[in-house]
Amino acid sequence: MRWSINSTFVVAVWSLALLLVLPLKTLPVSCEPTPEEPPYLIEFKAYVDVSSDDASRVTISGTLFNPAGSRTAVKAVSIPLGPAELIKLDPSSVSTSEGARVEILDGQDATSLVVVLPSPVPPGEKGAFQVSYVVLPGGYVKPWMPIGGNSTAGGYRMFNFNLYNPNLTMVQGITDVQVTVLLPRDALLTQLSPLMNLFYPNKPVIEANLVTRRTQVSWTNLTVAPGEGRLFIVTYSLLGTPSPPPQSQQSPPGNTTSGQVAPMSMVVLVGSNGLAALTSAALTYLLLRRKLTQPREAPTVKEEAPPKTVLSQLSPEEMKILETVQAAGGSVSQRDIPPMVGFSKSKVSRMLKRLEELGLINRTTLGRTKLIELSETASRLLSSSD
């Protein structure tokens, strides 16, 4: 078979085309970047030692892993604590593990502790960190004033702590999250109100040490904190504190334990009822006589109801929110209220708007949420209500 010039030309063209097409097909595959694996936490724990003077020493620790697919070494871990004016951090108390150093960053939304590791954790290796600090009284621990009381000097307390997410990834099913709270000596778990639980979240592990006379509340195997963090609450009282007054309707004074009215109380009751009847009749006679003898006057504008009637206009759910804010020391972030009262975010938002219109709360923008504070009117009405 003889090759013609045309056949040779065709073969040359096809060979050149193949040489040009094959590199184009393989080029995108070789240039596709491999996905980066971010560093993540294996453990994330908080241990809070609450003292009898309402100060709290907090130790936050964790173990991290920097995957082989990561492109950078982990040099520092940033842990948000919350707004400085709410947590009341003692800057002189901040410390970290040996070889590391810690920096305090006061941001617009929150104060953060940045733990600079002794040496960077390269891809494919593990690292650990730890930081301790003290929160002053009025920060994580706030006195609680019973409804009807006029002082917070009693031994009722509410521990309110937020564990915020650090700057490392937390993976559900991998990251072990634990929080432990050690209450002061002779502290007793106490339900401060029928509308409140002893703790939040529910079902922690309770351990009481008879030697040290201290109670420990622990949450283990927690799910990864949703959003920016997770809220933890413990309510307690110090030994010797009387039981909180019941919030339900109390029996009228003068009743004996058997429910019978004492003889002297009966005499006083009959006498007072008779005097009240005579007084009412006299006043009615004088008012009718004055109305008939005096000329008709122009109708007067009806006076506004006294401020105490504002609380009577509230629904039980709105009262629950007010009492919850009061129990938290008079101020709490709006995002923390739904888990505390058991209502949805939208329902809480609607009720807070109404409470603000009634002048019972003040709302201040605080980063991505709002700070809810009782107004002076609400504080006065709640403290003077029965």
Image (spheres, rainbow, N blue to C red):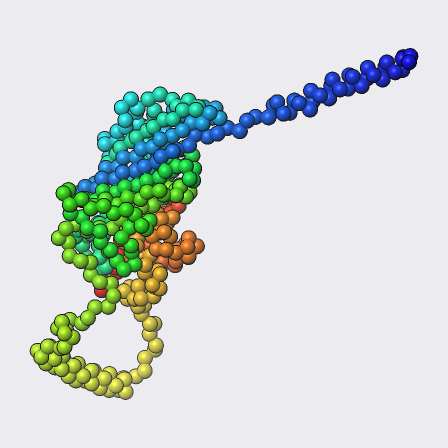
> Considering depth in this image, is 364 or 145 the residue closer to the camera?
145
Q: Quadrant of the C terminus?
A: bottom left
Is 369 positioned to the left or the right of 71 in the image?
left
Answer yes or no: is residue 84 visible.
no
Residue at 20% x, 82% y is: 280
Q: Quadrant of residue 315?
A: bottom left
Is 356 positioned to the left or the right of 255 in the image?
right
Q: Quadrant of the N terminus?
A: top right
Q: Position of residue 85 (x, y in %)?
A: 29, 41
Q: Residue furthest left?
A: 264
> Considering depth in this image, is 6 or 282 the residue closer to the camera?
6
| Total labels drawn | 0
Is 42 positioned to the left or the right of 207 in the image?
right
Residue at 31% x, 46% y is: 232
Residue at 40% x, 41% y is: 224
The relative height of residue 253 versus residue 286 in the rendered view (above or below) is: above
Q: Position of residue 61 (x, y in %)?
A: 31, 33
